Image: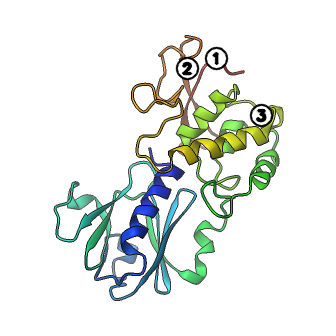
Amino acid sequence: MPEGDTVYRSAKNLAKVFDGTVLTRCDIRVPKFATVDLTGNVVEEVVSRGKHLLMRVGEYTLHSHLKMEGSWHIYPTGARWRRPEYQARAIIANDEFTAVGFELGLFEVVERAAEDSVVGYLGPDILGSDWDPAQAVENLASDPAREIGLALLDQRNLAGLGNVYRCELCFLRGVLPTRPVGEVNDLPRMVALAKKLIEANKDRTERTTTGKLRGDTDWVYGRAGKPCLRCGTRILKGTLGNNPLQLRETFWCPSCQS
């Protein structure tokens, strides 16, 4: 599941082959932006911002969000793609490489001057140069009645955490995801752990929170009905959220978390 570490890695890989190069192809397959053609423009840089990917080309920014199914693939120009063409939402290329955005949850073109209109609302980015743990703690604490599981997913508080890290953080800190933020002991320690986990995973494709790269790589996420790796109690699964369209599966150990 794409989270901040996945997007960071995608941006880093794209930057290696596109930063400073001239686009020889720009094929956007999103109706609203289908007529946009930035061929001939220089890619200044590709960066991540939380779970958003920003490709700065000339006076414009190509803004994408992977959501649940999206991914960026890089191929030597002319090589066969590993996914079907109908799933492509954006194709850009230079003399040597072609990048294809498959099943992107969001893709849009905005003027560079208006970039804040799409990412300006985000809190401090865990993997960004603007990372400010004290600000992240302050943001989380600003709504003490809110469930910690929802507060951690709110990108306005801190940017980059997704559902996997949310579930794992709550387990590792022994906190039920439904506990109000105001009742969570030592928020700074939780924020520090979030930073530690995502930093440890940002440069590898196999994400782990248990330290294992095979087998049980997660403590609770996706393990409903299985025994807790610590105490053996059956892992439970539920949903958390106020908006029916944004409900997220939540996993927890009823013994290790309270």
Q: Position of residue 164 (x, y in %)?
A: 53, 38
Q: Is there any visible trace of residue 19 in the rendered image?
A: yes
- Position of the N terminus, as image quadrant, is top left
Q: Position of residue 216 (x, y in %)?
A: 45, 25
Q: Position of residue 54 (x, y in %)?
A: 50, 69
Q: Of 52 and 209, which appears nearest the observer?
A: 209
How much space separates mark 3 and mark 1, taking CA atoms?
A: 16 Å
Q: Of 255 and 203, which appears nearest the observer?
A: 203
Q: Is there any visible trace of residue 146 in the rendered image?
A: no
Q: Amino acid at mark 3?
A: Pro
How much space separates mark 2 and mark 3, taking CA atoms?
A: 19 Å
Give SS at disc 3. loop
Q: Position of residue 181 (x, y in %)?
A: 78, 37
39 sits to left or right of 178: left
> Cβ–Cβ below 8 Å for labels 1 and 2?
yes
90 sits to left or right of 114: left
Residue 92 sits in which quadrant? bottom left
How much space separates mark 1 and mark 2, taking CA atoms?
A: 7 Å
Mark 3 neighbour density, 10 Å: few (under 14) some (14–19) many (20 or more) = some
> Cβ–Cβ below 8 Å for labels 2 and 3?
no
Q: Identify whether 190 is placed above or below 37.
A: above
Circle number at residue 236: 2
Circle number at residue 50: none
Q: Identify whether 229 is placed above or below 178.
A: above
Return the residue at label 1: 254
Q: Amino acid at mark 1?
A: Pro
Which residue is most to the top? 232
Return the residue at label 3: 180
Q: If you read the primary sequence from the N terminus, does the residue marked by circle 3 or circle 1 appear first?
A: 3
Q: Residue at x 58, y 52 (%)?
A: 160
